[in-house]
């Protein structure tokens, strides 16, 4: 028996879909694929081979022509070379406009699966089966798809909403603890920008939320998806409101770049949120208590809140080149209070540097 809950994304548009959250959810896949699908290509990384095969076998047993393809791990999956190989698989297997892709894996696999679906025959269905916390609360929901190029991450892609998203919480049990906690940074972000009940849950049991079997994990996943669902429903193509999801990300992207992508994304976002909070305070927009709450909540779950103090010129340069800034104007998401995100456009460079000093560990 499934204990699934459903969160609707894009209500009112012709591309609305459900995100299903629970355990033991394979039986829900045909429903999410919808009518008319004959062939399905399941893609997965090596670490998720058993899960990918289970999905393929289950679809086969339910009458689909189910194919499977393994892709390289992590960011290696998001390349034109891998996409080209999979276009070959789709072509050789006779995939038509009414067939579908299923992505089983972390955000890298769901980004690739979405990109494949967006590009094959100018758009086929994709159902995402995220297996990381970050994948569930962020990457698989919202319809942004993409691959990397030699010049940078996510430079090639398309908006292509999935036909559905299936979050099987049991898959999180095999995730390395560091990856799980890293995903918690995006959950906490949802707490600061939109749903402070998330912060209350995290603070009530900081040990428990570091484990995939922690008692609050399901509610945290559901609440975070609801935050993202609300935002992307109002702004599917990132014209304005959706920017609030980038809270902490301008600094995080710069840090990741300066560190040559050796940091986990969530850890960079954690430091980036403290940076954004300090910037908000320096701009006279946020009080001390909320800034302090950033540090205590993030530290409580084992996430970093500071960064070395000798990297400003490179960080600033990277922030100015971040693709989220429009034209030459640097735009950052700040907070005007708990759950009150705002924008800071063209800030004084001295203010930006002062916020960096506040988060420097020296
Ligand atoms: N499209 C969007 O809106 C969006 C939003 C946020 C992030 N992203 C993208 O998501 C990607 C990061 O996603 P991620 O953090 O999930 O990384 P990931 O996909 O690389 O997964 C992390 C690692 O965990 C392994 N793994 C995944 N699930 C597992 C499981 N259940 N058990 C054991 N191992 C498992 C993977 O093989 C990988 O080695 C980035 O490429 C980022 O650009 C996209």
Image (spheres, rainbow, N blue to C red):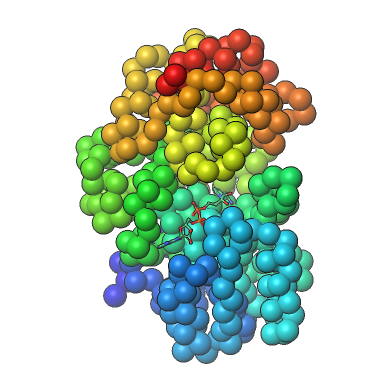
Is residue 214 found left or right of 285 in the rendered image? left
Q: Residue at position x 39%, y 20% from top?
A: 291
Residue at screen point 76% across, 66% down: 122
| Frontmost residue, 153 versus 63 | 153
- Above or below residue 265? Residue 106 is below
Classify 240 as above or below 14: above
In the picture, which quadrant includes the N terminus?
Answer: bottom left
Residue 177, percent across and down?
34, 52
Identify the residue shown where x is 49% and y is 15%.
Answer: 357
115 displayed left or right of 166:
right
Can residue 13 be seen in the rendering of this structure? no
Residue 88 percent coordinates (x, y): 73, 77
Residue sitting at x 32%, y 61%: 173
Rendered-image quadrant of the C terminus: top left
122, 170: nearer the viewer: 170
Query: Quarter of the image holding residue 306?
Result: top left
Question: Which residue is at the front of the view, 232 or 109?
Answer: 109
The reply to whether residue 52 is in sight is: yes
Residue 77 picture location, percent across and down: 61, 61
């Amino acid at each position: 028996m499934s204990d699934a809950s459903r969160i609707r994304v894009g209500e009112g548009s012709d591309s609305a879909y459900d995100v299903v959250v629970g355990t033991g959810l394979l039986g829900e896949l045909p429903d999410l694929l919808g009518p008319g699908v004959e062939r399905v290509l399941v893609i997965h990384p090596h670490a998720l081979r058993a899960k990918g095969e289970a999905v393929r076998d289950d679809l086969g047993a339910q009458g689909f022509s189910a194919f499977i393809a393994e892709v390289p791990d992590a960011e290696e999956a998001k390349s034109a070379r891998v996409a080209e190989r999979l276009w070959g698989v789709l072509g050789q297997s006779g995939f038509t406009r009414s067939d579908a892709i299923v992505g089983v894996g972390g955000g890298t696999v769901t980004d690739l699966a979405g990109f494949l679906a967006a590009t094959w025959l100018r758009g086929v269905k994709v159902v995402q089966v995220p297996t990381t916390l970050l994948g569930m609360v962020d990457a698989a929901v919202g319809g942004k798809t993409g691959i990397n190029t030699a010049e940078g991450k996510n430079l090639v892609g398309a908006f292509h909403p999935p036909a559905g998203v299936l979050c099987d919480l049991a898959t999180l049990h095999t995730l390395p603890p560091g990856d799980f906690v890293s995903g918690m940074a995006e959950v906490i972000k949802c707490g600061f920008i939109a749903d402070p009940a998330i912060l209350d849950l995290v603070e009530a049991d900081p040990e428990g939320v570091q484990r995939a079997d922690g008692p609050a994990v399901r509610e945290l996943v559901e609440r975070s998806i609801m935050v993202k669902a609300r935002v992307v429903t109002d702004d599917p193509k990132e014209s304005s409101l959706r920017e609030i999801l980038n809270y902490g990300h301008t600094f995080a992207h710069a840090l990741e770049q300066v560190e040559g992508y050796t940091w986990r994304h969530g850890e960079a976002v954690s430091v980036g949120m403290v940076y954004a909070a300090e910037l908000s305070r320096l701009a006279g927009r946020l009080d001390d208590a909320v800034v302090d709450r950033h540090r205590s909540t993030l530290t409580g779950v084992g996430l970093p809140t500071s960064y070395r103090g000798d990297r400003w010129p490179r960080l600033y340069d990277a922030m100015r080149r971040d693709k989220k800034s429009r034209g030459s104007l640097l735009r950052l998401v700040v907070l005007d209070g708990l759950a009150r995100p705002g924008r800071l456009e063209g800030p004084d460079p001295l203010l930006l540097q002062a916020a960096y000093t506040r988060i420097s560990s020296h």
